[in-house]
Each structure stands twice: as C-alpha cells, then as structure tokens.
Amino acid sequence: MSADLLFAAGPILLLIFLMTKKTPMPSPKALPLAALVAYGVRLAWFGTGASLVNASVLAGMLVALTPILIVWGAIFLFRTMEHSGAMGTIRSWLNHLSRNRVAQVVIIGWSFQFLIEGASGFGTPAALAGPLLVGLGFPPLRVAMACLILNSIPVSFGAVGTPTWFGFGQLGLSAEELRAVAWKTALIHSAAACVIPLLAFRLLVSWKEIRRNFVFIILSLAASVLPMCALARVNDEFPSVAGGLVGLIVTVWLARNKVGLDREGAAEAEETGAAPSAPAVVKALFPLWATVLVLLATRIPQIGLRGLLTAADPSWTLPLGSLGNFSISPSLVLNLRGIFGTDLGWTHQLLYVPSLIPFILISVVTWWLLAAPSGTAQKVWRESAAQMRNPVRALLGALVLVQLLMVGGEKSAVMLIGHSLAAATGGGWQYLAAFLGALGSFFAGSCTISNLTFGPIQDSIATQMGLERTTILALQSVGGAMGNMVAIHNIVAVCSVLGLGKVEGEILKKTVVAMLIYGAIAAAMAAIL
C-alpha cells in the first residue's frame, strides 16, 4: 500500500475502528474526530491549500443542512401523529388487518418503504417506516437494522430515478444506453430481492414464521419487483414508484384475504374490540398518504411543481466578502458561490428538500384535521428539537468528512481509493465494481452522489479493460443502492428518529454483512450479464 493511499484511507479506517470496537464511540464524537483527522491529513500530507480545505469544511457543514432538516421533519411528523391520536388508530387498524407479524413487517418494512423511496429518497423511507414498526411492538434496534437493509433494492430508482438519470447525466450516455443501464440495474436488484429481504425479515421475526408465511412473502416481493423490472425496460424515473404502489396495494389485499399467511392459531390472534371505521382509518392515515401524494406531485416533472420549487435564478444577492456570494431565488433556493475564493459552492432547495414540504406542512394540516389537543404544537416542537441534538453533531461531522474525502481532484481520497481498487483487481473488475459504488454511498449517504463521484471512474475502467459499459455502470448503481444500508449518516438518521443512542457501530456490523451478501449476488449477476 502506497503512503498516499494509506493516508487517504486513514480517516475512514479510524472511523470504522472507533464505531465498531468493543466499547464503540458514539457517532456524535467519532464522526467529528474522523473529520478532524482528514482535515489534518489533507493539509499536512497532501499539501492542499488552506483556502480549499477550509472551504470544504464550510461546504460540508452547509450540505449537512439537507439531512438535518429531513430527519427533523420526519421526527416532527411522527410526533404529530403520536400526539394527535393518529398512531393509535393506525396500530389498531393494522392489527385488525392482520395480527400476523410477518404481514405487518412486509407491508410496512418492504412495500411502504419501496413506495416512499420511489417518490422521495433522501433517507425518508426508514424515517417513516421505522416508527410505525416500533409502534406495533417490534424492538427499535432491530427495526433500524431491518429498515436500512430493506431500503436498498428500490434506491437506484429512488426520488423518481434521480440516481440513474441525474447520477450518470455527465457521462454522455445515449437514451438507448441509459435504458440498458436501468434494465440491467433492475435485473441485478431483482436477483438480490430473492435473498436480501429475508435477511431483514429475520431480524424481526423467526425463521419458523418466515417458512409458515413464505407464499405471502414471495407474492409480496414479486408484487413490487416485477413492476419495477417491467418499467425499467422503457423508463428510468418511475420503476420504484410503480413497484411500490402496485406492491403496497397487492400486499394489503393479500394480508386482508390471508393469502399465503399461516392460519394456525388465527382465531386466538385476532384483535379484540371493534375495528376502526374506514373513514377513521383514512383520516388517521392522512399524514402518510398526503405525504406520498405531495412527494409525487412535487417530483414528477410533467406536473410542473418541481420546476417552480427548484427555480434557481436569484432575485436577491448579497456579497459576503471572503465567504463568497450568497443569493436566494423566488423559490427559496439558497446559493453560496466562491467559498473562500475557491470553486466550491453550496445550494439548498428549501422548498424541494423533503422537510418543510411535505413534513412540516402536513403536520400543521394534521393538527387541524384531527383536532389535536391544545398544546400539541408546543409538545411536538419541543420533543423534536430535543431529539435532534446528537444527530446534528453527527451529521455535521459526517458531511464535513465526506467533503474532505472528495477534495483534491486526482489526489482526493475517493479517487486514490477507487483507482487502487481497480488496479488491484486486474481483469476481474466486474466482480468488484459494485463495492466501489457502495464505498461512495458509505461516504456520502447517497446513491446519487456515489454515481456522480464514481460513475466517471467506472466508465473509464470499463473502457480501459474492454468491459461492457452499461453493465459496469449498472453495477455502480446497484453498489450505490446496497451501500445505502451502511451509509453513516443514514444510520445516524434512523437512530435519531427511533431515539436510539450509541448503537451505530452495532448496526453497522449487522448491515455490512447484508451488504457483502448483496455484493456477492451482484458479482454473480455480472458474470451472467
């Protein structure tokens, strides 16, 4: 290992050690410490200019505003549901729909997360599904692990396909090549869907329960995966949205009619008391279905709201001296350009990032619609703010670390690590390509950023080695998706929503095993493709 590679990987190795050792260091301390080490390495070993390094630190802190607001919005919404009585009604409805634990896990952890990922992405699915499963009596730590593992298969087409059409947008792919990437990506994910969800379900239910309800599980998995595959043949935006919507409808129908579910002991398991009425359930579910509708309405370009919420032409500009030039558009798109005289900048789409819209907006409407008790607003504000103290520190550390790992051009940590991995594998790169994509998601917590960062490297390696371009890019996209389950800031986010402390290392140990199995399946599919 060269000295450059050793120093480039040092902060990452330190972070992994701190968070997985016998007495793990909590992420609000470990992440800022790793970022501090990366800062020193970039200045002292690589000799990067102080202005650029300091600009990277400030850019990382500003970029952290996105996951911080998303997590806070998700917590805010679920505190609203708890204090308005919506959660009580939903729990009762789910228990009357099916007391079968497998059915509950599949409906919420698989189908519902699939739909939310397709509509929004940004780590929203686990933040929405996790509290529902905990509310049904499943243990929070295992819920966090299961939600992270399950929120991987739809990720390549999450946020209306952003990781694919935007993540590879700079590579100059033809429309035919982009469709081939989408199709191959869907095929690899479909193969993984035969194994990976079962690993997640096992965290919440026993193998015995899985075997007894296996027909229901297979039908539910197929209900999401088959539409995803079918649409990926012709489209790269809506495969996960279609898979999630069809899958959720079919899975609820299967559960209601007990298709493929274990009937042994069903009479004893029935919920006592009257089931909530249909209007009451629809009303209690308003925060969830309204959130999905708003997310879809604001993310489908043809509707027109997306353009309105992301219009970036500034209407007001404020020079901030050496800090750069700050501007704001009528759509509240915030921009900071030329940070410390460098090319680095920051953009935040305040109305488009899923926080104020839909989470806060839907919460306020819910207070009125469900006639929440007086004092609910104050409780929700107070509790959600208190729950964000540690996640804010952790997410600031995570995003500063990410920025420092990406600064330096060809001498950046991500480039050094990526090229070293490619060189070490020789002609067998297709079997490890997905792991480079996962590494990008581990750094950035985003399949889109992984594809933007490592897509050009993967494309270059494919050309140099004479490998099929679209296959290697599909493996990169699959890797970015499977890396979602080990991404540090995703782990921090779901822990904060579920109120878990000092367990990030334990979660990482469990999810990395699932990720390695996912990578092995991707490698097997690479041989076939």
Image (cartoon, grey):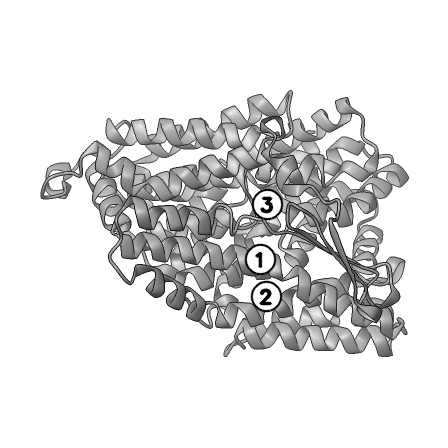
Do labels 1 and 2 touch, CB within 8 Å? yes
Residue 5, by quadrant, is bottom right
Closer to us: mark 3 or mark 2?
A: 3
In percent of the image, x 50 and y 58: which residue is there?
Answer: 71
Question: Disc 3 marks which residue?
Answer: 352
Q: Secondary structure at mark 1?
A: helix
Q: Position of residue 137 (x, y in %)?
A: 27, 55
Q: Earlier in the sequence, mark 1 or mark 2?
A: 1
Do labels 3 and 2 touch, CB within 8 Å? no
Question: Disc 2 marks which residue?
Answer: 395
On the picture, is 25 further left or further right than 380? right
Residue 175, by quadrant, is top right
Q: Position of residue 501 (x, y in %)?
A: 44, 71
Q: Earlier in the sequence, mark 3 or mark 2?
A: 3
In percent of the image, x 62 and y 68: which residue is there?
Answer: 396
User: Of residues 457 and 90, which is closer to you in this image?
Assistant: 90
Amino acid, disc 1: Pro
Classed neighbour count for the residue bearing mark 2: other residues with Cα under 10 Å, few (<14), some (14–19), many (≥20):
many
Q: Position of residue 371 (x, y in %)?
A: 25, 49
Q: Residue 345: in sight, yes or no?
A: yes
Classed neighbour count for the residue bearing mark 3: other residues with Cα under 10 Å, few (<14), some (14–19), many (≥20):
many
Which image quadrant: the C terminus?
top right
Q: Earlier in the sequence, mark 1 or mark 3?
A: 1
Question: Disc 1 marks which residue?
Answer: 67
Q: Residue 106: in sight, yes or no?
A: no
- Work out how far the residue at label 1 is from the one at label 2, CA to CA, in angstroms: 7 Å
